């Protein structure tokens, strides 16, 4: 909001002499005769300078102007404060509505993700609810990543618990009296089976050695018969 003081280029507390010097300097700068080619602009500026000096150089008019200007400034400041407050309230309400909408979209995506749907389905559902594409993509990516992390954590816990259960059961069975007894019995059974296998092998080898001469004689006899000429 420009003032008469701004027109002359002096502060509001300027003295009469400072106002006079500022007027002379501005008048010389914007006199139409000193602005060839821009007479119209210079003439308008020169007239504003003369009007400002006419009021500020008169003590009574300057006092009235200062009072009116101060009142106008108060009104303007109050109006600006009201405008800023209303603007802040509108922005706060818009942020609250946006946050509520965002929370609703996240909740919707989480529900579909819990049902086992993948990221593309989440994205499509959000678009169907009039969610902006960029926001829908961001929510779908985040929720899908969160669900994947949850599944991996659950699988890791289950694997760890299963391994702990197996280790616990195995240790208890191995140290129990029944396990020791069963292991001893299995060892004895295996030993008996090994001895039986060795005995059977020895018996076959003996039978083969006894049958070898007869087999050899039979072969020679057939060769003799084949050699005869009838």
Image: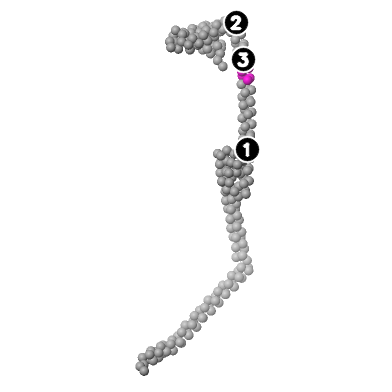
- With respect to residue 57, does 192 lie above or below? below
Q: Is residue 58 magenta?
A: no
* Residue 164 screen position, x and y as percent: 60, 57
Residue at the location (50% across, 11% down)?
44
Per the image, the residue denoted by label 3 is: 72
Secondary structure mostly taken by the magenta-highlighted segment of the chain: helix
Assign the C terminus to one quadrant of the image. bottom left
Per the image, the residue denoted by label 1 is: 101
Q: Secondary structure at mark 3?
A: helix
Mark 1 and mark 3 residues within 8 Å of each other at the beta carbon: no
Q: Which residues are magenta?
A: 70-79
Q: Residues within 10 Å of mark 1 (few under 14, many from 20)?
A: few
Assign the N terminus to one quadrant of the image. top right
Residue at the location (49% across, 82% down)?
204
* Residue 134 screen position, x and y as percent: 55, 39
Q: Residues within 10 Å of mark 3 (few under 14, many from 20)?
A: few
Mark 1 or mark 3: which comes first in sequence? 3
């Amino acid at each position: 909001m420009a003032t008469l003081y701004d027109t002359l280029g002096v502060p509001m507390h300027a003295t009469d002499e400072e106002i006079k010097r500022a007027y002379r300097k501005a008048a010389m700068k914007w006199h139409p005769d000193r602005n060839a080619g821009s007479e119209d602009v210079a003439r308008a500026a020169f007239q504003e300078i003369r009007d400002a000096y006419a009021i500020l150089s008169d003590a009574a008019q300057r006092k009235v102007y200062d009072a009116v200007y101060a009142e106008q400034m108060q009104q303007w400041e109050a109006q600006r404060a009201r405008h800023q407050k209303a603007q802040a309230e509108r922005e706060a309400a818009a942020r609250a509505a946006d946050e509520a909408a965002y929370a609703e979209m996240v909740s919707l995506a989480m529900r579909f993700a819990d049902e086992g749907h993948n990221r593309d389905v989440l994205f499509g559902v959000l678009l169907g609810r009039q969610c902006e594409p960029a926001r829908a993509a961001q929510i779908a990516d985040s929720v899908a990543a969160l669900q994947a992390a949850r599944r991996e954590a659950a699988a890791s816990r289950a694997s760890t618990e299963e391994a702990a259960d197996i280790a616990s059961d195995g240790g208890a069975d191995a140290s129990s009296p029944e396990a020791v007894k069963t292991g001893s019995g299995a060892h004895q059974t295996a030993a008996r089976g090994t001895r039986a296998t060795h005995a059977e092998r020895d018996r076959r080898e003996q039978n083969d050695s006894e049958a070898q001469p007869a087999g050899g004689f039979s072969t020679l006899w057939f060769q003799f018969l084949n050699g005869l000429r009838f």
